[in-house]
């Protein structure tokens, strides 16, 4: 059974979509980038991974501002705004203490949140992430990807999927690229990448 999609509101009025599934110790998953959680769970390997991760856990997932089922027309993608989105979800689910999971570009948000609210975060799990985008990729390689997001979002979304999965699972990479493309605009992804490189 798919989790029920719910909504909460950040302090600046942005609507944030989230879902809760399972039972047990709470695990809040920051959006890895610009995906939509309800689309990603339709990709079998991703759904299998989430099922394993969610065993004996209460899983909380949400779509970041400007992406997925959250408010799309947003101008503020600052770290403060993203921290506000995460806190709005934590308050909506009434979590007192939880494990915080982040991968890809969400590491910056998770690290900042754990630093700001150390009593709420029992464990911080970071996978394939970084404190700044330029820690993962030099600015001279990152800048063309940012521009590709703005000029050809279909190619950029395929490139992101190919960077991690094309050799091992080409069909899954295709599904992921479609999910990335449907979850937001290239401008949103470019803006998040630019902010992450500072």
Image: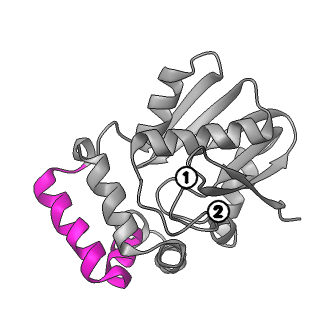
Can you identify the residue that label 1 sits on?
31
Q: Earlier in the sequence, mark 2 or mark 1?
A: 1
Name which residue lies at 59% across and 56% down. Answer: 14
Q: Quadrant of residue 4?
A: bottom right
- Is residue 91 rendered to the left or right of residue 189? right
Numbered disc 1: secondary structure: loop
Name the outermost residue toward the top: 119
The CA span between labels 2 and 1 is 8 Å
Q: How is the image coloured?
A: one colour
Neighbour tally class for label 1: few under 14, some 14-19, many 20 plus, Cα within 10 Å: many
On screen, residue 176 above or below 198:
below
Name the outermost residue toward the front: 12
Say whether marks 2 and 1 touch (CB < 8 Å). Answer: yes
* Secondary structure, magenta segment, majority class: helix
Name which residue lies at 53% across and 57% down. Answer: 65
Q: Nearer the viewer, residue 2 or 43?
A: 2
Q: Position of residue 184 (x, y in %)?
A: 48, 72
Neighbour tally class for label 2: few under 14, some 14-19, many 20 plus, Cα within 10 Å: many
Please report the bounds of the magenta region as a residue range.
Answer: 137-162
- Is residue 170 rendered to the left or right of residue 30? left
Name which residue lies at 32% across and 60% down. Answer: 191
Q: Position of residue 94 (x, y in %)?
A: 80, 33
On screen, residue 140 above or below 43:
above
Which quadrant, please, contains the N terminus?
Answer: bottom right
Q: Nearer the viewer, residue 10 or 1?
A: 10
Can you identify the residue that label 2 sits on?
37
Instruction: Assess whether residue 55 is covered by the magenta stretch.
Output: no
| Res. 62 mark | none
Q: Quadrant of residue 154?
A: bottom left
Numbered disc 2: secondary structure: helix
On screen, residue 17 above or below 29:
below
Name the outermost residue toward the left: 140
């Amino acid at each position: 059974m798919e989790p029920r999609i719910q909504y909460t509101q950040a302090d600046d009025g942005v609507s944030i979509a989230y879902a809760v599934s399972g039972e047990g110790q709470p695990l809040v998953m920051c959006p890895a980038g610009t995906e939509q959680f309800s689309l990603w769970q339709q990709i079998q390997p991703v759904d299998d991974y989430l099922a394993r991760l969610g065993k004996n856990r209460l899983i909380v997932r949400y779509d970041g501002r400007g992406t997925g089922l959250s408010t799309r027309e947003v101008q503020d993608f600052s770290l403060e705004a993203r921290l506000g989105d995460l806190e709005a979800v934590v308050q909506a689910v009434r979590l007192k203490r939880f494990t915080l999971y982040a991968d890809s570009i969400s590491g910056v948000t998770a690290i900042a949140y754990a630093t700001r609210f150390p009593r709420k975060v029992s464990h911080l799990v970071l996978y394939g992430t970084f404190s700044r985008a330029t820690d993962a990729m030099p600015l001279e390689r990152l800048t063309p990807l940012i521009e590709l997001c703005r000029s050809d979002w279909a190619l950029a979304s395929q490139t992101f999927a190919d960077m991690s999965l094309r050799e091992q699972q080409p069909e899954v990479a295709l599904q992921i690229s479609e999910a990335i493309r449907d979850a937001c605009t290239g401008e949103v992804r470019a803006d998040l990448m630019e902010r992450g490189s500072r």
